[in-house]
Image (cartoon, rainbow, N blue to C red):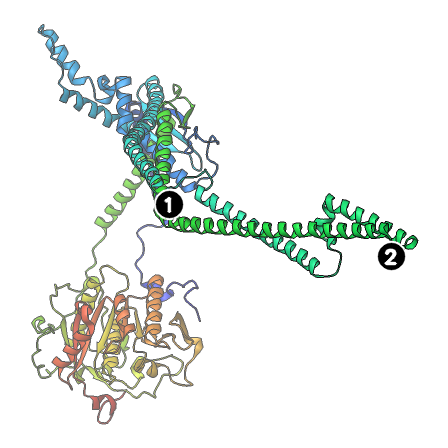
Amino acid sequence: MLDYNQPIDRAGPEAAQRKPQAGFNVLELANLLWRRKVAIAAAALLGAALAVTIGKSVTPRYTATAQLYVDPRELQLVDRELTPRAQDVTGMAMVVESQARLITSNSVLLQVIQQAGLDKDPEFGGGEAGSLMSSLLGLIGLQPRAPSAAEKREVELAALDALNKHIAIRKTEKSFIVDIEVWSTDPAKAAMLANTLTNAYLAESRKSQASAARRATNDLSSRLKELRDRLRNAETALATYKAQNNFVGTQDALISDQQLSASNQRLSAARAATMDAQARLDQIEASRRTAADAGAIPEALQSPTIANLRAQYADARKKYAEQAGELGPRHPALRQTEKQVEDLKRTISEEIDRFAQSAKNDLTRARDFEASLNRALEAQKRQSVQLSQAAVRLRELEREADASREVYQSFLKRSRETEEQESLNTSAARVIGEATVPQRRSFPPAMSLFAMIGFVFGAIAASSWFVVAELLFAGATAPAPTPARPQRTPAPDAAGAPQRTRLPEPLPPQPVMRAPVIEQIPPELAALPLQPSMVEQPVIEKPLIARFQEADVIHTLGAILPTGGGVDLTRLGWPTLRPGFPMTSLLNAWRDMRAAVTRRAGGKAMPVVALVGTGKTSGRSVAALNFALAAARDGARVLMIDADHQARSLTNRVIRPGKSEPSRLGWLSIGSKDAREIKTVNGISVLPAAEGDAGKAADAIHKAIAQARSAGGYDLVILDGPAIPLAAGGRKLLEDIDSLVAVLPTSLDVNDSLEEILAALGPAERKLVGVVLDELTPAMQTRQRGRQYA
């Protein structure tokens, strides 16, 4: 088995014998050219001389090339970096392409025309008419008139168009290098024009940059006054609102906020002082209430008066103790010392009372100070709340003033930058190679190449002339074949072809004269082969009609197969054409259908025709088989394909379980192990139906047709099917089919059957070339009694 990816073998020896012999082979062609070698050599030398003459007469061209380095990263003169570091590679390539296109822009080329005076150069269309007119007027003594502005403009446009044709811009791949090529008939002029073009481009680039900066400066400056007024109004409104709402303060905060913070701190300090005074008073009172020493409080210990009194008190008590031991209790000195002790104790107590009174006064003063600070803080809080509510509008005014200030500052800065950029050249483009005067011409090429081309073409032309003359002479002297054309009965009238309207009722069967059957002559030799070139080619406007009748066929038994001879299509149990009747009306009609199929194929080597029909019987398959047998009788190599993958009528007849012989299968496959080409003894190859759904079966048939067409081993492909109604695979299969033949059983209404077929075909109905009226009754197709068997 061969799959579709394997190479396809060409037709076998039998098919090769049927192909016409070529007019020349390689040996004969070599002999012919060797006999004419002198004439061919003379023609080649003549061609070389003619080519050299033409090359000498062509005006030479000289091309000068200048190289530019076009860096898309412009110089950043106002930033820190001289050039930007990272840019998009695609964007840079587009910039270079745009700059290369700018070189040939009209503004640059017009500058070149003005600088080089090309409007007066005859090579660029200038100065010809003017110089001729000036010469004519000078002959008669008149001064030529000055050209008008319109005439100057016309001359400039003509020079511009000519200069465009003399320039070629080439960009080196993956680089910023641009080659400017200018050709001219004068090498010095070509170099001059190339250098002038590069200088004009650089000047135009600088001019465009300065113009862009100037436009930007003018646009920015026109907005500065409006932005300045807007900023002034915003700042004035802000200052007025601050004055009205007493928003006065330092740079960091308002005075009211600072006062509130200071008052809060002072209030905290006053509260601490009050608490301290209260604690000191409580301690003094506690000391006075207890029996402890009243001078033990910190204030008493720190007071020098208390310390002095306590020292005196200690001395007095000491003296009293000494006198009490020496003197009696009533001694005046002792009483005086005792009184002194009592006086000092009373004095210390009075001093302690003064400390308590002082602590009370301090506590009262601290409380009063705290109350005053609290009242001031409450007032400042109320003022702060009022200022906070007014600060909402203040912040809005501040934001507006800040935004106006930033916009104004950015516009002012950008305006100054663009104003300075007018005088700066930020372009990184530069000339890296000036054009030099070319030493060799660029066109035409060397005369040796002209001579070689002329020599080759002269030899080929002479050889072709001798070969054609030999073929024509051989065709004129050879005797023309006169094949005898067999007589045939006329086909049914074409006016009865099927249309969308109702068909007329079929005519009753006509008797056909039967010739005696000759047993000694094989059926394949009984009919004269009829080649397509021998068939009359009528112009068919409507599909042909063929009547398939009982008189045209005989019936056979399907079980009788010849031993050792392979599959015989006349032994399938179906009605097949009678042998020895080559001139019946059915065969003539089928020949006309095949001729129409060949014309519809448009010159294809292997036209494809499909027989379609309605109903579930095997009538369509029987008609397709006999259609193939009729073509094989006329000498055609036929490939028959079962395209009805559901019914598989032909496949089931050809391939029977347990009877297939793999050694006799052919090279053509249709996608499965069973569906391989079967060569029959009738000269017809049968390709059984493929396995799978309709789509896969259609694809397999497509590939099989393409494989057979590339091999070239067949003259006609006949498809049994697809079945009506058409599935998606069947509609797809109709695209590869050149023609269609409808099989209409007369046991049903032929008009209804034809309407059903045309409706199913849709746009493919234009491929319909014929209609076969199947007059074989279904009973006759299945029952074999009372008939002749072979």
User: Quadrant of residue 604 in the image?
Assistant: bottom left
Q: Is residue 504 left or right of residue 218?
A: left
Secondary structure under badge 1? helix
Q: Is residue 365 left or right of residue 541?
A: right
What's the amino acid at mark 2?
Answer: Pro
Q: Is residue 537 left or right of residue 403?
A: left
> Observer-nearest residue: 500 or 776?
500
Q: Residues within 10 Å of mark 1 (few under 14, many from 20)?
A: few
Residue 34 seen anywhere in this rendered image of the structure? no
* 42 over 289 or under it: above or below: above
Q: Is residue 744 left or right of residue 33?
A: left
> Observer-nearest residue: 319 or 710?
319
Q: Which residue is mark 1?
A: 395
**Numbered-mark total:** 2
The answer to whether the residue labelled 1 contacts the one labelled 2, judged by CB atoms less than 8 Å apart, is: no
Residue 458 seen anywhere in this rendered image of the structure? yes
> Observer-nearest residue: 284 or 664?
284
Residue under the image location 48 percent in, 43 percent down? 258
User: Residue 639 at x, y = what percent?
Assistant: 31, 71
User: Residue 623 at x, y = what percent?
Assistant: 23, 79
Secondary structure under badge 2? loop
> Observer-nearest residue: 698 or 273?
273
User: Residue 671 at x, y = what percent?
Assistant: 39, 72
Residue farthest bottom in this picture? 785
Q: Which residue is mark 2?
A: 329
User: Residue 339 at x, y = what percent?
Assistant: 79, 52
Q: Using the numbered discs, state the Cα–Cα distance from disc 1 to disc 2 in whole angstroms.
A: 92 Å
Residue farthest right in this picture? 326
